[in-house]
Image: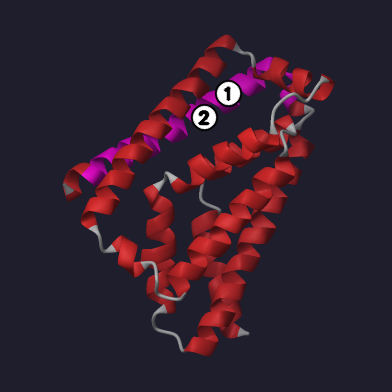
Amino acid sequence: METFIHGFLVCGGLIIAIGAQNAFVLKQGLLKNHILAVILTCFICDIVLISLGVLGLGSLISESREATVALGIVGALFLTVYGARAFRSAYLGNSSLEIQSQRQDNTSSAWKAVLATLAITLLNPHVYLDCFAIIGGIAGTLTPDQKILFLCGALCTSFLWFFSLGYGARLLIPLFKRPITWRILDFVIGSVMWLIAFGLAKYAYQLA
């Protein structure tokens, strides 16, 4: 039980921190944009990545400097573009209109939501560092049986967090009926994206 709680807390400390993925899930929850598909995509990604990290297979990827640099560059470019879109939305103030159109016709494709979630998750090298270097490093000191318990605790955190964040966001919808609130959220999301993009670009430059 102690190992399970250890995995639960370690993963919780990493996953709950404000980041690109959490900001994305929060906004999709507010927009009610295929949130179940978004949450399940995040959770399935965590199942794969955390499992690889705990079982030691992730070290093969994390030890490749070329792969890490490439991920850093691609991730920085993607987050820069995504952040720019968030700033544009904050300037135009059109997010409140977006939620209205979703309620009326819900034309947004679930597949587009899934692909966007995969991009925001898998193009961020911080995800691999967290899962392979930190979680994998801690799990490397455990016995095979303890690793399974540690993995179960970590995945339990992921499941509870993403479902709470995605569906809990609906409680904030009355607040987001005001366009100014959407503008503030979009500005914060854009800032987070650009800060992470800057960190990734710096990280890739230092490795190169």
**Furthest residue toward top:** 92
Q: Is residue 160 left or right of residue 50?
A: right
The disc placed on residue 89 is none
Q: Looking at the picture, how far across and down is residue 24, in whole percent? A: 58, 37
31 up-or-down from 74: above or below: above
191 up-or-down from 154: above or below: above
Residue range highlighted in magenta:
176-204
Secondary structure mostly seen in the magenta stretch: helix
Q: Is residue 201 magenta?
A: yes
Q: Is residue 121 left or right of residue 39?
A: left
On the image, numbered disc 1 is attached to which residue? Answer: 184
Asked whether the residues under the numbered discs 1 and 2 touch, taking CB atoms below 8 Å apart as contact, a structural biologist would say: yes
Q: Looking at the picture, how far across and down is residue 112, in whole percent? A: 62, 33
| Residue depicted at 60% across the width and 66% down the height | 155
Q: Quadrant of residue 7?
A: bottom right
Who is closer to the viewer here, 38 or 15? 38
Amino acid identity at mark 1: Ile
| Residue depicted at 52% across the width and 31% down the height | 189
Quarter occupied by the N terminus: bottom right
The disc placed on residue 188 is 2
| Residue depicted at 71% across the width and 52% down the height | 163
Q: Looking at the picture, how far across and down is residue 22, in whole percent? A: 57, 44
Count of all numbered marks drawn on residues in the image: 2
Whether residue 173 can be seen here: yes
| Residue depicted at 71% across the width and 15% down the height | 97
Q: Secondary structure at mark 1?
A: helix
Q: Is residue 40 magenta?
A: no
